[in-house]
Every structure is written in C-alpha cells, then in structure tokens.
Amino acid sequence: MKLTAPAHMPTGIMFLPDPQLGDVVRPDSRIQVLRSMTGLVRTHVKRQTTKQTHVYNFNLAREKALELQAFIQTYAGVKWRVTWGSQDFVGILTANPAELEMSKRAVISASFENVVVSLEFETE
C-alpha cells in the first residue's frame, strides 16, 4: 500500500505491506427510526453515496510503526492519496492519533516486536 500526503502536491510517501484480511469499505448511510403517537414505526435510510469509510489493519514491525506514527503526525489534517492494488482514492485520516497496539514483545531485540495498527480513511 502506498500513502502519499498531501494529495494535491505530495511531499511525503510511505509504503506499507498489504493490510490484513478483513479490511472494510462501507458507505456512510444513516438509519432514522421514527415512532408515531399511535405506535407505528417508520424507518428512513439517509444515503450518502459520495462518502465512504475505508478501514485497514496492519501488522508491522516496531520500527515501521514508529515511522508511520511520525508520518501521521506530520501530515495530520490534510488529504491523503491511498493506492492499494486497483484502488486509488483521496481521503482524510479520521482516527488520529492512530492506535498502536503491541502484539508481540521481544527481550533480545526490538526488531522482533510486532505492532498492530488500524487506519481509517473517509473519502468524499
């Protein structure tokens, strides 16, 4: 996966391994439930066809996770271009700061430590 920021004039590029299976692409639709005085229930779906949320989970080495964290802090609040396989979209990172969760610790060397990182983008 390739992350470039800012999207309109890239000054930073970050390459990440493929995300773990289970990445999510979902449209941002809202369901509104209305109840009348007689007890009749009506539901309305407010569809927003232009916005989508992309969630990617990565299993990274500790050094790469720290590099990603510095990249996120540098380019927080600007639009990013995300390229992965056939997907290419421009979006904003919504979960800032990104959560870094240690999944494997090593006593001998930091290169054997693994970190799970979750990135969530919202496209327009």
Image (cartoon, rainbow, N blue to C red):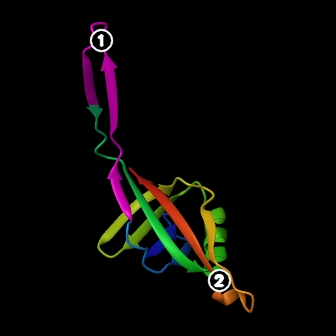
Q: Residues within 10 Å of mark 1 (few under 14, many from 20)?
A: few
Disc marking residue 113: 2
Q: Position of residue 49 (x, y in %)?
A: 28, 44
Q: Which residue occupies 36% across, 47% down? A: 51
The amino acid sitting under disc 2 is Glu
Marks 2/1: CA–CA distance: 56 Å
Residue 108, compared with residue 87, is above or below; it is below
Give the mark, 2 or 1, whose residue is nearer the N terminus.
1
The answer to whether residue 62 is magenta is no
Q: Residue at x 37, y 60 (%)?
A: 24
- Which residue bears the numbered disc 1? 36
Q: Position of residue 28 (x, y in %)?
A: 36, 44
Quarter of the image containing the N terminus? Answer: bottom left
Q: Position of residue 87 (x, y in %)?
A: 32, 69
121 shown above or below 43:
below
Q: CB atoms at circles 2 and 1 under 8 Å apart?
A: no
- Which stretch appears magenta? 23-44
Identify the residue at the far front of this view.
Answer: 39
Using residue 72 as the reference point, say whether residue 46 is left or right of it. left
Q: Residues within 10 Å of mark 2 (few under 14, many from 20)?
A: some
- Where disc 2 sits, the SS reads loop
The residue closer to the viewer here, 106 or 80, is 106
